[in-house]
Image (cartoon, rainbow, N blue to C red):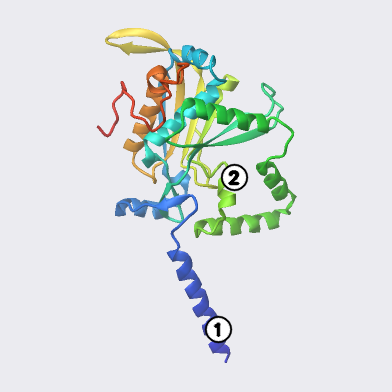
Amino acid sequence: MDWMITGGIVAVLFVVWVLLESKRSRSDGTPVKHHPYRQIMWFIMPRRDDGLVFFDRYIQVEKLDAYLEDINKRFECSMSTLLAAVVGRALIQNPRMDRFVVGHRLYQRKQSSISFVMKRTRKDKSSKLATIKQPISADDTIESVCRSVAEKISVERTDVKTYADKEYALFNMLPRPVFRAAYWVFRVLDYYNLLPASFIDNDPLYTSIFMSFMGSVNMDAGYHHLFEHGTCPLFLMIGKNEDRVFVEDGQVVVKPCVHVRFTYDERIDDGMTAGDGIFAMAGALEEPYIQLGCVKDDGSDQYKFGDERPRHWKLTSE
């Protein structure tokens, strides 16, 4: 009888394992079929930091200050908020960048979003940090994103405890061994696509890209790692405005620019896809009136993120 009970338990466990392995659906992503070579990459490079690729670029922003001044006549928009919106727009225009790897499988993200950190009290080094997670869609405009981010920031800068505050407080109450065990269960649920959508929707690291605007604290951009927690395959650091020397049409010129450093999980797609996203971002910052609009009072230049706009840069895929 003992061997029958043991055999039954093994059979049940095997069936459960097969069911778990066959579950491909997730609340935040759709499975993507890819080249067999890339599927092997997910096994030989199981962690995000195993597949890191770094990109470095100086983007000219000589028109950006005037553009910011003009749009602030219609609605409030800081440099950091504008940068977040521009990065989100680049994702919408390059959906292959908006993928992630979980459980050795590739997924196309269902809802694009961008996360970034801010001080809860402006210009206060001792102030606590708050993280904003902003959904992005093809119907968004610079104005809609700026207004939405402003609302989220106003909430974060109050004394109201957010979902993240309550979640962190709960985890910090757990003894270390219990926390480690609980987090192991969390990772297993995520691996087998069993993690509840409520955890994913409210976690800033389950996002398309994480951005840090170092220029707000007068610092240069650095190279940042990717987090193993969550599904974020991209990290963007943007440095302070500075004057740089460029050569244009054989002439040496000095122009204002921002230094951008970009960390990319190569497992989601090739470097050509990353290049297209960076070009789209750079083009919007270099020609904001043409690419972004939202300046005219009559609304005739309310360009949506999904709209095709004339561009002065060349995509790598062309």
| Residue type, mark 2 in image | Asn
Name the spot of residue 148 as percent of width and height, x first. 56, 31
Residue at 62 percent across and 32 percent down: it is 152
Q: Which residue is mark 1?
A: 6
Residue at 36 percent across and 30 percent down: it is 307
Crowding at dot 1, Cα within 10 Å, few <14 / some 14-19 / many 20+, comes out as few
Name the spot of residue 164 as percent of width and height, x first. 66, 43
Q: Which mark is residue 202?
A: 2
Return the residue nearer the eye: 294 or 106: 294
* Label 1 vs label 2, nearer the camera: 2
Image quadrant where one finds the C terminus: top left
Residue 54 falls in image quadrant = top left
Q: Is residue 278 above or below residue 27?
A: above
Q: Relative to 219, is 278 on the left or the right?
A: left
Circles 1 and 2: CB distance less than 8 Å?
no
Crowding at dot 2, Cα within 10 Å, few <14 / some 14-19 / many 20+, comes out as some
Q: Of helix, strand and loop, which one carries label 1?
A: helix
Residue 221: tell me if it is visible. no
Q: Of helix, strand and loop, which one carries label 2?
A: helix
| Residue type, mark 1 in image | Thr
Name the spot of residue 17 as percent of width and height, x first. 48, 69
Residue at 45 percent across and 70 percent down: it is 18
State which tag comes first along the sequence, 1 or 2. Answer: 1
Q: Which mark is residue 68?
A: none
Residue at 50 percent across and 57 percent down: it is 191
Give the residue furthest to the front: 298
Return the residue nearer the eye: 152 or 281: 152
Give the residue furthest to the bottom: 1
Residue 7: tell me if it is visible. yes
Q: Is residue 164 above or below residue 148?
A: below
Name the spot of residue 262 as percent of width and height, x first. 44, 32
